[in-house]
Image (cartoon, rainbow, N blue to C red):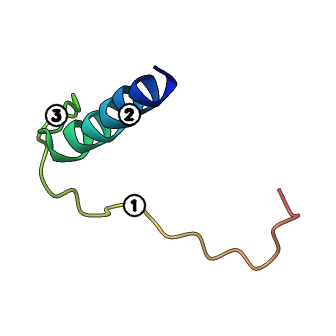
Amino acid sequence: MAISKMLVSMTQFISEAFMRIFTPTDDAYPMIGFQPFTGIPYKGRNSGSW
């Protein structure tokens, strides 16, 4: 009995991991494309001067 429960839980663990790896992503990020940097780079030498 204990061996069958262990086998069922191991099979479930492996199948859930497989499903999580190989399913399509469910991220809700917008498709915004490439965003180039248009700001002014920081050239301060002393980080404690603010």
| Relative to 47, residue 28 above or below | above
Q: Which residue has dot 2 on it?
A: 7
Asked which quadrant contains residue 42, the reply is bottom right
Q: Are marks 3 and 2 in contact (CB under 8 Å)?
A: no
Asked which quadrant contains residue 12, the reply is top left
Between residue 17 and residue 2, name the one nearer to us.
2
Q: Residue 31: horizontal and vertical position, in percent?
A: 11, 40
SS label for mark 2: helix
SS label for mark 1: loop
Q: Residue 36: horizontal and vertical position, in percent?
A: 24, 63
SS label for mark 3: loop
Q: Which residue has dot 3 on it?
A: 30
Between residue 38 and residue 10, name the one nearer to us.
10
Asked which quadrant contains residue 30, the reply is top left
Three-letter amino acid code at the position of disc 1 = Gly
Q: Are marks 2 and 1 in contact (CB under 8 Å)?
A: no
**47 horizontally vs 22: left or right:** right
Q: What's the residue at 23%, 32% (across, down)?
A: 27
Q: Nearer the viewer, mark 3 or mark 2?
A: 2
Q: Which residue has dot 1 on it?
A: 39
Q: Residue 10: horizontal and vertical position, in percent?
A: 39, 36
